[in-house]
Amino acid sequence: MTLYVILEGVIAFFLVAGGIFAFIGSLGMAHLRDFYMRLHGPTKATTLGIGCTLAASMLYFWVTEGKPDIQEMLITLFLFITAPVSAHLLAKTGLHQQLKYVKKTSGSPHELRREEVGEKPVPHPDKGHG
Amino acid sequence: MIQSRSWLRTPLLSILLLIVWLLLVRSMAIGHILLGGFLSIIIPLVTRRFWDVQPSVKKPWLLLRFVLRVLADIIVANLEVAWLIVNPWRRLKPAFVEYPLMLEERFTITLLANTISLTPGTVSANLRMDGKTLLIHALNVEDEEALIEEIRERYERPLKEIYEC
């Protein structure tokens, strides 16, 4: 019986932790200062949030149904594959649109520099390769 | 793998697809094995043109160590980013960092970029098409050189060892 209590505690811990992380991720997306910083919330905190929730789910059904089920692992797997790709594409789109970023950001990639002189269109740096 | 003319060009991919299919439907019934087998042969054939040649894994045990390290780093990264977000006294120093790549294969560069996106406070933003630099946006950077050095030592060198040499 005590085993059940401990397991319940563990499951509850995972659920609460998952909820907190997912919330923090969304909070980051809502209130960080610029597009590129907001991107960090959903790619990281949310991944762990969902991971924790799925771990709780896995554990719960393992305890109640008596046999392990790794189906939830698939969701985590797909998430790990898709999250960085979509983050990369979003960041790339942001660069392409030359979205503004906060002043204190150090480093100025040439993707975001405005051409200072001349009216001629600037060839995209990627052009002419692969 | 690409050169062979048989209808089963990528056996590993097919097996992986079959396993994922069986896990998804949660059954080992003969019908599902047949359907999954059929799909796992058809899908690689249809999507063949999207695939790059994948370099073979030279040192599988290093790959395993790499995966475990990345998983651990993901958890640490999550905690760090979560703290950065909620900490009211934070003074974030975001930065664009240009990371000079040592890797050459497109496949391994993809792996590195994904790893960077998943780990400490960094998102890979743009791969310059000449394949020499990766533009990274970092949430909080004290020292750019240290960041580059860390990525180089922790992720790129193992990847290079695993796949390229």
Image: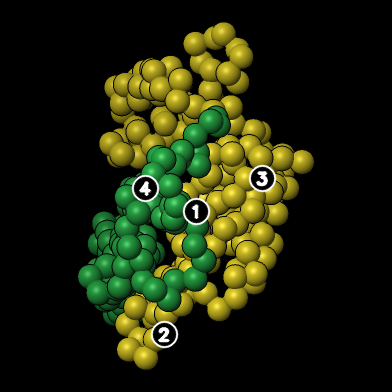
Chain colours: A green, B yellow
Judging by the rendered image, the residue that carries numbered circle 4 is A96
Residue type of the residue flagged with mark 4: His
Q: Is residue B148 left or right of residue A33?
A: right
Determine whether B129 is above or below B122 in the image.
Answer: above
Q: Residue at x 64, y 33 (%)?
A: B55
Q: Given the image, on which type of amino acid does mark 3 rest?
A: Leu
Chain letter of disc 2 in the image: B
Q: Which SS class for mark 4?
A: helix
At label 2, which amino acid type do we have? Arg
Label 2: how many Cα within 10 Å (few below 14, some 14–19, many 20+): few
Query: In the displayed image of the protein, which residue is found farthest to the top?
Result: B5
Quadrant where the N terminus of chain A sits is bottom left
Instruction: Give me the residue at 39% from left, 18% from top.
Output: B46
- Does mark 3 fall on the same chain as mark 1? no
Q: Residue furthest bottom?
A: B89
Of the pair A34 and B115, the residue shown nearer to us: A34
- Same chain? Circles 4 and 3: no
- Of tags 2 and 3, the one toward the viewer is 2
Looking at the image, residue B155 sits to the left or right of residue B140; the answer is right
Name the residue tied to disc 2. Answer: B91
x then y, percent, for residue A114: 41, 55
- Vertical order, B77 against B117 (above or below): below
Q: How many marks?
A: 4
Nearest to N terminus: mark 1 or mark 4 = 4
Which dot, 2 or 1, sits closer to the camera? 1
Label ID, residue A110: 1
Q: Classify B21 as above or below A90.
A: above
State the CA–CA distance, disc 1 to disc 3. 22 Å
Q: Chain of mark 4?
A: A
Q: CA distance from mark 4 to mark 3?
A: 25 Å
Residue type at mark 1 is: His
